[in-house]
Amino acid sequence: MQDYEAPVRAEAAALAATPCVGGFAGTYPCSNVDLLSVLPLGSIGGGNGNSMWGWTDTATGKEYIIFGRSTGASFVDVSVPTAPVYLGNLPSYNGTSSSWRDIKVYANHAYIGADSISSHGMQVFDLTRLRTVTTPQTFAADARYTGFGNSHTLSVNEQTGFIYAVGTNTCSGGVHMVNVSNPKVPVNAGCVSNDGYVHENQCVVYHGPDTTYTNHEICFNYNVDTLTIVDVTNKAAPVQLSRTGYVGVGYTHRGWLTEDHARLLMDDETDSDLPGTKTFIWNVSDLNAPVNTGVHVSPTIQATDHNLYIIGNKAYQASYRAGLRILDITGIASNALSEIAYFDIYPASNNTGFNGAWNVYPFFASGTIAISGIEQGLVLVKHNPGVPPTTVWSDTFETATGWTVNPSGTDTATLGVWERGDPAATTSSGAKQLGTTVSGVNDLVTGRLAGSAAGDHDVDGGVTSVRSPSVTLPGSGVLRLNLSWYLAHGSNSSSTDYFRISVVHSGGTTQLFNQAGAASNRNGAWTAGSWDLSAYAGQSVQILIQTADLSTASLLEAGVDDVTITRS
């Protein structure tokens, strides 16, 4: 609550369909996403926007959005996304107001909860009533569940017919389970309370690699500072399978499983967004011991990430001031994600803060994607992927390709210089040199041996550099450098230590990225990054990697793997 920011009132005007051309659709920054329409808040009931969900009427094929606002829930027919139709409003219970409203759909019924309203409960609305609506109406709920008062969010398992309310005034703020198999007669099914307050969750009938739990109903709970996994197959006796923290925690917000249930992506709402928005990557193949395997750091935005969903090999992320971001997760097993599209509904800023895109809904069969804007209202867009990028040059370090250590002859490091090889793992208050690579056997690593102690082969004495062979870039197109990297150090590090990536070109050397050390422990974790090289089109360039231990004998390790340059 203390971090919530009042909406900046620059409400969007109603806009018609506008393609994304030259980086803009009207006034909205974009890439590979076209604008279909905008319905400002004033035209769908007023107030501030928050969360939303979608419904497809299987009897008619029509698509609808149920849009949460501070004072109620709006119903919008988006079957013709370039001309959406507002059908009416279900007011908040007893005329109350909340900045947090959440909606889920099961069996043609919408379930609506609200936070900070002790008497709200969960409204139930029969969505088939919308079939005959021709003019905007004020609706009444068909039923109201009163087993809890306030709720932060709801999730639904459509396979089992249960709603899972979290952040309520019951169950110690944990998971409040509701049987909605009879949609208008919700029944309390029990609590998961032993790990306290849950902010968001996802519950599924599990079909992942951990065969012990095949066909069990499993909830992945985002518990403020942990990922907590619970078996809720027996609602009367839920079993906590694991409770796992991670480095860099701020406020564990929400995540989503890959379709094979082997991995998940997670948003942390108040982690440090510097140097870029962070998306945490998890291996959940063992439900009793999930592992945070890496972090994707955006090279272009520092916005607060909020909600995300995964469909196939794409993640759809609502990142507040940076709008909708679409990530290719094909390389998730190697901690390699890449942004392939975006639509920014808050052009004023891409930095940390709570304005703009609250939620996205990407599940319509039509391809229409809905964005709920706190100030903007309902924004409908469509991903237009265009031509996929082609690889100009790549190196996985499985063979020697001509990288040069100490290329200028000015390095000062006495130990831990860059080398290509099979790295040995070291630990000291957590992982330091990673014994795993992103792909294959080898990577670029600072002193690949482990020795008898973690500091035996780390970087010591100053700077160590390694430079790629020359790469001639195409003369046109969007050119990007992509690679995976990590920097690890002990608490004896300082901001004078660093990991840097630069491009050497005809005009000199330009720094693309800098990660400074700090007087705190930082564990090694593979992180994927991407940087624009378009300014050097037509030139021969080299990639320069530098790491420096400029503190007094700090423990410092770094690695690089899977370097590519692409053109699109």
Image (cartoon, rainbow, N blue to C red):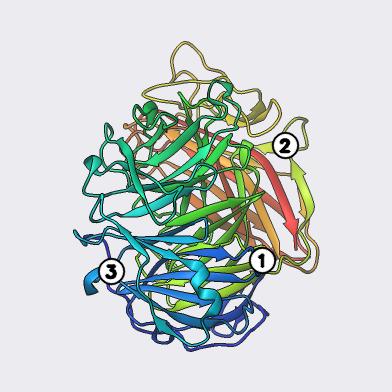
- Residue 80: name its quadrant: bottom right
- Residue 316, x across and y down, in percent: 56, 58
Nearer to us: label 2 or label 1: 1
Residue situated furthest top in the rendering: 452
Q: Which residue is mark 3?
A: 5
- Left or right, 404 with respect to 130, comes to right
In front of the other: 415 or 394: 394
- Residue 552: name its quadrant: top left
Nearer to us: label 3 or label 2: 3
> In the structure shown, which secondary structural element does the residue marked by tag 1 occupy?
loop
> In the structure shown, which secondary structural element does the residue marked by tag 3 occupy?
loop
The mark nearer the N terminus, 3 or 2, is 3
In front of the other: 272 or 510: 272
Which amino acid does the dot numbered 1 rest on? Gly
- Residue 378, x across and y down, in percent: 48, 76
- Name the image quarter holding the N terminus: bottom left
Q: Which residue is mark 1?
A: 367
Residue at x-position 52% and y-position 17%: 450
| Residue 248 drawn above or below residue 10 | above
Q: Which residue is mark 2?
A: 396
The mark nearer the N terminus, 1 or 3, is 3
The circle drawn on residue 218 is: none
- Residue 318, x across and y down, in percent: 48, 61
- Name the image quarter holding the C terminus: bottom right
